[in-house]
Image (tube, grey):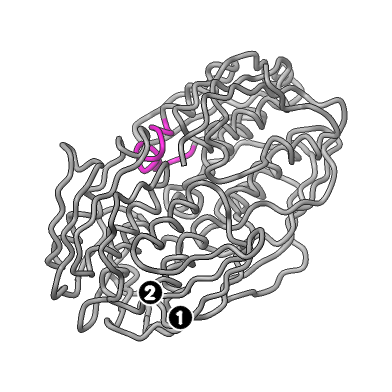
Amino acid sequence: MPHAPASPLLASRPAGPLTGRLRVPGDKSISHRALMFGALAVGETAITGLLEGEDVLRTAAAMRLLGAEVTQLAPGEWRVSGRGVGGLTEPADVLDMGNSGTAARLLCGLLAGHPLFAVMTGDASLRKRPMKRVTDPLSATGAVFRTREGGRLPLAVQGAADPLPLDYVLPVASAQVKSACLLAGLCAPGVTRVVEREPTRDHTENMLRHFGASVSIEDTAEGRVILLTGRPELVAAPVHVPGDPSSAAFPIAAALLVPGSRVVVENVGLNPLRTGLFATLREMGARLTIENERVEGGEPVGDLVAEHGPLRAVDVPPRRAPSMIDEYPVLAVLAGFAEGETRMRGLQELRVKESDRLAATAAMLAANGVAARIEGDDLVVQGQGGATSGGPVPGGGTVETHMDHRLAMSALVMGLGTRAPVAVDDAAFIDTSFPGFAALMNRLAGGEALRAP
């Protein structure tokens, strides 16, 4: 799956409000895990609502190379015939994970527990991202990893023939590292113990239970302790993938910015460990409500209703970062239109995303006339909302996206509210998580608000 050539895109203020009902692509985190757990289960796992962006398609291709049967029956509808825990086979080719850090890091855990040799690589962006945060703890299973300098891809792994269970305290809040350790623990006898000081998204724990594993959670003085009993028989189970809250953030933010707008995003996953942005938006005074709340496949789901209105600055505490780590760029955009100074604290994890998202977000704002500064691990944004602030954000800049899909979408949302259009140097990578983003936003706008320059 070669990457598309650079695809510049321009966003300008639409002629009227954004209106309509829509569904965003399936949750990327759950989609990756559904394919992986389906490959480890006995029987055929039926998946509906799977995100068919490039990141997830890379995971599907990797599961095929590892011996699982992965078939697309219709758009969003997939079947996986698994090999059972410990049953994956040595791949005959390199596992190319494209742009997906989630897939690469989780796959390290999957491979560590199997007695096979594999080589993994990715695109230019992924090859810059650190993997030591997973390879270091996973080496305690008995797996052997060889990487480029700095723990970067390409990576070779010789999985453990007799993997040992892990007892690991996460040094930073990371659902990817936690999940990699739990995936490795599936193949080890005894109990794998992972401790996180700050709770992170728990899709892995939910899905382990859904497929029949024994997982318990204890809240202790040390932190949140996850205990997994190794070598279970995972049994195929249907997975209904809800809409991705990280993707829903973009049409919601656009509706909050564009006067007169009212947008309903249906079937969005509302896992409380993923909804820090929505809590923050309400603190900012956003007109954001939830309708039709329900539980599907063990995950809370609902419809989000966003309406335009004034926003005020907030101070976002560092403990909220794990529940909204992917949403800070678009929150920073909204902060630029709010009244007052917004401070987002504890964003060190943004430095190791698809780009250095902390620096890139500040640069995006500065290029379009918003005063922003980085203080340690905090991002501080001076908003331009309010009656005496001089009006909307100027815009008019070109944003360097650094092959980062979320940065590109955040900049394009900004352009829907600025005085002058906002350009991005490359929108091709948006398809890794949100296929059809530009077409969907144009449908809401009733015109070509997003277009080629």
Q: In terms of sequence position, does the residue under pointer 2 or pointer 1 come before the other? A: 2
- Residue bearing the label numbered 2: 40
* Residues packed near mark 2 inside 10 Å, few (<14), some (14 to 19) or many (20 plus): many
Q: Which residue is depicted at the point 86% across and 34% down? A: 446
User: Residue 162 location in percent, x, y?
Assistant: 13, 75
The residue positioned 51% from the left and 46% from the top of the image is: 54
Residue 347 colored in magenta in the image? yes
Q: Residue at x 43, y 34 (%)?
A: 357
User: In percent of the image, x 52 and y 80: which residue is there?
Assistant: 237
Using the image, determine if residue 31 lies above or below residue 392. Answer: below
Q: Nearer the viewer, mark 2 or mark 1?
A: 2
| Residue 154 located left or right of residue 359 | left
Q: Tell me where the magenta segment starts and ends, as one range.
A: 344-358
Which label is found at residue 409? none
| Circle count | 2
- Label 1 CA crowd tier, 10 Å (few <14, some 14–19, many 20+): many
Callout 2–callout 1 Cβ contact below 8 Å? yes
Counting from the top left corner in percent of width and height, residue 151 is at: 19, 43
Residue 222 appears in the picture as rendered: no
Residue 381 visible in the snapshot: yes
Q: Is mark 2 on a helix, strand or loop?
A: helix
Please name the residue that numbered disc 1 is placed on: 211
Residue 444 falls within the magenta-colored stretch:
no
- Mark 2 and mark 1: Cα distance apart in space: 9 Å
Q: Is residue 338 left or right of residue 367?
A: right
Which of the pair 191/197 is nearer the observer?
Answer: 191
